Amino acid sequence: MSASCQGRKAELAREAPAEPKGVWARFGDRVYLCGTLGAAFDAWQRRLAALSGADAYFSQQIGLDAVEREMDRLEAEARASLAEGETLAPRRSPGYGGMPLSLSREIVDRLEATRRIGVAVTDSDLLAPSKSVTAICEIGRRP
Amino acid sequence: MSGITFLDGGFGTMVQAAGLPPGKDPTDWNVENPGAVAAVHRAYVDAGSRIVLANTFGANRLKYRGPHPLDALISSAISLARCGALVALDVGPTGKLLKPAGDLGFDAAYEAFAETVRHGAAAGADLVFVETMGDVRELKAAVLAAKLNSTLPVFATVALDESGKLLTGASVECVAALLESLGVDAYGFNCGLGPDRMLPFVERLAKVSTKPVVVKPNAGMPRLVDGRTVFDVGPADFAATAARLVDAGASIVGGCCGTTPAHIKELAAALVQGARRRRQRSASTGGEAAQAPAAKPRKHQPLTTVSSGTSVVELRPHQGLVIGERINPTGKKLLKEAYLRGDTAYVLREAVKQVDAGAEVLDVNCGVPGIDEAATLERTVETVQGVVTCPLQIDTADPDALERALLRVSGKPLVNSVNGKRESMDAVFPRVRRYGGAIVGLCLDEGGIPGTAEGRLAIARRILDEGAKYGFGKGDFVFDALTLAVSADARAAVVTLETVRRLTEELGVNTVLGVSNVSFGLPNRPALNNAMYALAKRAGLSAAIANPSLIRDELDPAAEDVLLARDRNCERWIAKNAAQAQAAPPPPASASGPDALGAAIRRGLRDDAAAAAKAMLGSGASAMDVVEKGIVPALEQVGNAFERGTAFLPQLLMAADAAGDAFAVVRRNLSSSTPQPLNSSTPQPVRRPIVIATVKGDIHDIGKNIVRALLENYGFDVIDLGRDVPPETIVERARAANAGMIGLSALMTTTVGAMAETIRQAKAAGLDAKTCVGGAVVTQEYADSIGADFYAKDAMQSVRIAERVLR
């Protein structure tokens, strides 16, 4: 990426509405996680896209980075809560690696993520707002 | 304990304790375990609750997925709750997000709530209690459904987060503006927070609310422990803190998640005790009655508020806030065409630019002859409020269009307008009463526009009187004193300014003006408009409908002379400004070659590219030269570099943005110098447009937006239909616009099916437009399998395909 691209991206990263929210909880041997940048981020992106394709692109990268950072934070919190001898496998998200997209609904429902952080599942199993992620971590035991 | 009404506490908490299995919907128990439901209600009534919420929180068709019919669940719930207290039909959220954040349409949400309300009213509920709302739009859908489908009182509460906002970002004041305007009977907060954290927000609400304040806090903050939500605040602590909410102004009090009959009982006891202590203290000190809980902080109603889904704007005299006037097709050919073609991109650009330039409210007008104004206004309102957060001004003379827009607009809009004609007042007042809003009142009537301030004030008074019959007060109005051209009547501005001053001082109302009419027919209009704005602000003007990029509070003495009728026939003004216009300096000749333009585009420098294009035109180059020698070769170089892998997508997009700005300069030049541009939106020869959309079910549109930007900046005529667009709409729009190509985007495996369906319908309809598909999960194989003509692996390739198809 050229210097001016980097500069513009950094500028946008500073003005992006950044209030990531997340919830996680343990259900038996699994941890469910859900994080989001909220509706304000989507509105900001659409606003940028109205005037500039480049800004739309940068905002996309900024959003993906930010929501993954929030998921990292949640995963770290969950890991810190484990009992002695338990291990947490890296998170996997519905829609990737053979995990069905429809699993998102179960994660959102069980975490009450709609009420708590404003994430809902659309009729086509997408997450809304668009910069939202659901994931599951399996809990294992050290041999 | 007079003046305080006790609600119940948590319901889910109680039925879980009674054995409701995890994951089981408590709504089912209305039919499957009625005894347990009735026992919870009875326990609350025994604890002192005077209103109980029936077990209907999840009883709406969008949320409930169990086996029982809704009417049976709701009617059972209402009768189970009837045990000595008033029974509220509990209306909770749908569990889905409304557009633009999610995929739920406003109408679908409204219908779902309406169905629940009708069942509840039929079952004999005493009131409707809308609760735990996290989105102002969903709140509006629920409250309107309650008010329009029953005659019951309506209470409404929202769930705040720790920053005192709804999940979608609305503030306390924003919620208040909407709910006051919709005329609910009581409102406040529930869930989300414990009583201590709710306190500052109750204090804020009490300052702006004219209705009883409702609170139903949680028993502290929730924690998830191994899949169960737990709350930590016990009855005594809860009661002690919740009592402070009453001191802060709450008068309808209960609890939410984690609270139990014990919490309510303690709360009632604490409030009774507190009241007794205060009475004793006031008796012993000889009068501290003002400290009793009934004495809430003094309420004041802000003069006029308007709101969006997230923000609230207050209008005050002398403020001169700017209402952006640019989303109005009068005299704007491109906007007219965008409306007729259903293209959203043009409107979005105008909306964003105006807000960036300082507009605090945006006027939305879709009045084009021959257009379906109601449908267009509805669509435009939804589009604009998806990208900007400021309140809107709904600008239409068509009552049907007004009604549909009022229903769907987020928050409390300004309505432009009512006037003193009987027909206008009969059409506008009932609709605004029903759906909420502040109203612009035009000082004209059947007799036209009075020539005197006295005459205009008389009409304003009549509008106020008639509005009062519908319950509107002065704060619900903003009066337009009406601006007429000084070129036609030298005293036009004097009368307008006097009207503004007297409306402000004598009637105590807010005022608005469309200032730019004043300069009609005269040279150097911006200076006159600015002077009018400056003078009107001094006279009391609250808001100006104007172009936010141009209007400034700037008083040129010569312009002032014109407006105050001291320049006879505007002679001095015309002499001075007409001469100046002729002596305009030639544009600078520096950096005027195609090389400078090309360099600016390649480097993605938008301002430099626009300046270079302007300079080329200024030094005599034709529009075609600018395009063919400057813009196109530069885009070609960057595009080639991208395809070779030596430039990357962001550079390509930045170059395209810069090229787009250069194109815009050429377009402006064409439309001002030749009677008819070759093509409305590009300087290229006439070419069929490209219709582009994200398919039904898919709300991810950034990829599509990037492709749109690139195609436009490469000079194509693009009609952007937005996202989540049904196949029928795409086919209909493509046909109407005689599109040469249809571009479809889908992100997920679950939505590519809609892509296949769109192509099937396009072919079945006999369209000859080529179809081009793209998106994260789309492949060449998939494109082939659904019969798409082209697959574009990236944005640049969609440009190449468009070049092949359309050139």
Image (tube, coloured by chain):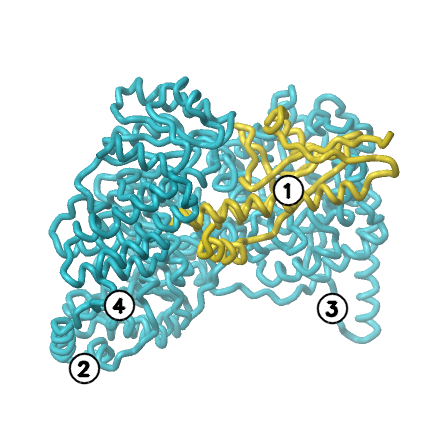
Q: Report how far apart the C-alphas of labels 1 and 3 lie in the structure.
A: 45 Å
Q: Earlier in the sequence, mark 3 or mark 4?
A: 3
The answer to whether marks 1 and 2 mark residues whose Cβ atoms lie closer than 8 Å is no
Q: Residue at x 28, y 58 (%)?
A: B610
Picture quarter containing residue B131?
A: top right
- All told, the count of numbered labels is 4
Task: Give the answer, above or below, for where B534 lies relative to B446.
Answer: below
Q: Is residue B778 left or right of residue B368?
A: right
Q: Give the percent coordinates (x, y) of residue B653.
A: 39, 47
| Residue placed under numbered mark 2 in the picture | B566
Q: In this view of the protein, which residue sits in the foreground, B713 or A2? A: A2
Residue B455's disc number: 4
Q: Which chain is yellow?
A: A
Residue type at numbered disc 3: Gln
Q: Report how far apart the C-alphas of labels 4 and 2 lie in the structure.
A: 24 Å
Residue A35's disc number: 1
Q: Give the percent coordinates (x, y) of residue B33.
A: 76, 23
* SS for dot 2: loop
Task: Give the answer, above or below, for where B306 lies relative to B538.
Answer: above
Quarter of the picture containing the C terminus of chain B is top left
Residue under mark 4: which chain is it in? B
Q: Give the percent coordinates (x, y) of residue B605.
A: 36, 57
Residue type at numbered disc 2: Arg
Q: Is residue B603 left or right of residue B34?
A: left
Q: Earlier in the sequence, mark 4 or mark 2?
A: 4
Q: Give the percent coordinates (x, y) of residue A97.
A: 62, 27
Q: Is residue B133 left or right of residue B361?
A: right
Task: Give the answer, above or below, for where B158 lies relative to B593.
Answer: above
Picture quarter containing residue B711?
A: top left
* SS for dot 1: strand
| Residue placed under numbered mark 3 in the picture | B291
